[in-house]
Amino acid sequence: MSLSPATSVPSFKEYDEAGISHEHWKIVLISGMGFFTDAYDLFIIGVVMTILKPLWHVGKLEVSLTESTALLASAIGAFAFGRVADILGRKRIYGVEVLVLAAGAIACACANSIWWMQAAGLIFGPLLATALLATHLSPNIVWRILIGFGAVPALAVFWQRRHLKETPRFEAARREAKQQTFMSGFATLVASRKLLLYLIGTSAAWFLMDAAYYGNTVSSPLVLSVLGGNHDLRHKLLSQLAIFVLFAAPGYGLAAGLMDRLGRKTIQCIGFLMMAATFSLLAFVPDLTHRAGAFLAVFGISFFFTEFGPNATTFVYPSEIFPVKVRTTSHGVAAAVGKLGGFVGTFLFPYLMHWKGLLGAESAAAAACVTGLAVTWFLLPEPKGRTLEELSD
């Protein structure tokens, strides 16, 4: 890091123009394990609830609460940890949160009733679940293994997370800034009209994406059940695995490869548009349920454009367009609102399915995506090709 001679402001040009190194890939792996855990838990809870329904005689209210309450709790965590990271530093809390994840997963695996469970992902989830179901182990053991495994990836990176260096931009900002209080960061965001609009845009887009995405993902066994037939849980898991491998994973890869070329705003708008189109097809074309191949293709395409779209960009946006002194505060607020959207979508989706089937559930998801498109188009800038200092100036 160097200082600009004219302004004595730190210059991060050498960081911005540096090539990808071994250290970068290490950080990607360590930080990515958090997303792995989130995706695994997201998927597994739907499978676990399918196993527990006959074991514990679970009703619709208990199913909705179990599949959604962890999202509500994670909203509180994102809000609080985001602000604390701007006060104490990223390094001080990086690693603490994975211990919370691990403790929650282990505690869930030891639960004796539905009122003890937290939520619980995408490709590894169905693989592990299918393998365990093939062993003919007791269902009471299978669901505990599936939930408890969520602690493994979190614990695997705890030590590495605690020993990562603090980000240079935060270190520079901390040397220049006065001591922050918990509320000062929120006051900064509210005082600036531009930052407030950005906060509303990033939060609303994340809320709407999670409402549509989490509802469809957690309740994917319920969505696939409309195809009828006498398929058992293993066959449904294999269908979901095929969708995630053939559609979701390539969508992520394409987003990573094209985000700096097409831009965040373009990808997010394309994603929301195509999500709305595919969800509308599922809602308003009832004949699709009689053609399994066409139905699975449309459902899969919705996952492709979720990953090549807002699920890849909603968490990138607040990392780039806010000043460093309130960056994790803003990210925490947006993530918290997003998780609230996930809670709403996950809680309501089963009720909408029982009320009007795909028409009720998928039309609501399509409406959320159309609104997300409008929010992105009118409230968010295009960060492509600009430094973090230029974006937050």
Image: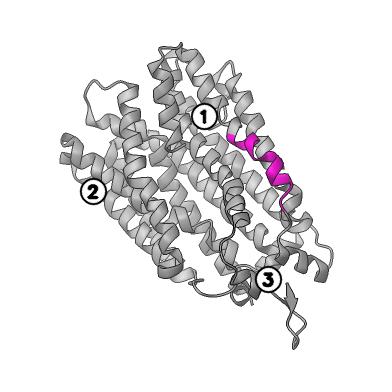
SS at badge 1: helix
Please name the amino acid that badge 3 sits on. Ala
Question: How much space separates mark 1 and mark 3, taking CA atoms?
Answer: 38 Å
Q: Is residue 141 left or right of residue 272?
A: right
Q: Earlier in the sequence, mark 1 or mark 2?
A: 1
Q: Which residue is mark 3?
A: 191
| Secondary structure character of the magenta stretch overall | helix
Residue at point 64%, 40% (across, down): 157
The answer to whether residue 185 is seen in the rendering is yes
In this view, the mark in front (2 or 3): 2
Please name the amino acid that badge 2 sits on. Leu
Please name the amino acid that badge 1 sits on. Thr
Q: Is residue 336 left or right of residue 366?
A: right
Q: Toward the viewer: 250 or 303?
A: 250
Q: Quadrant of the N terminus?
A: bottom right
Q: Is residue 130 left or right of residue 200?
A: left
In this view, the mark in front (1 or 3): 1
Q: Toward the viewer: 337 or 25?
A: 25
Residue 387: name its quadrant: bottom right
SS at badge 2: helix
Start-end of magenta stretch? 153-164
Question: x, y percentage for residue 331?
Answer: 61, 57
Q: Which residue is mark 1?
A: 66
Residue at point 69%, 36% (across, down): 99
The answer to whether residue 365 is seen in the rendering is no
SS at badge 3: helix
Q: Is residue 97 magenta?
A: no
In the rendered structure, are the residues bearing label 2 and label 3 in contact, judged by CB atoms less than 8 Å apart?
no
Question: x, y percentage for residue 11?
Answer: 70, 76
Q: Quadrant of the C terminus?
A: bottom right
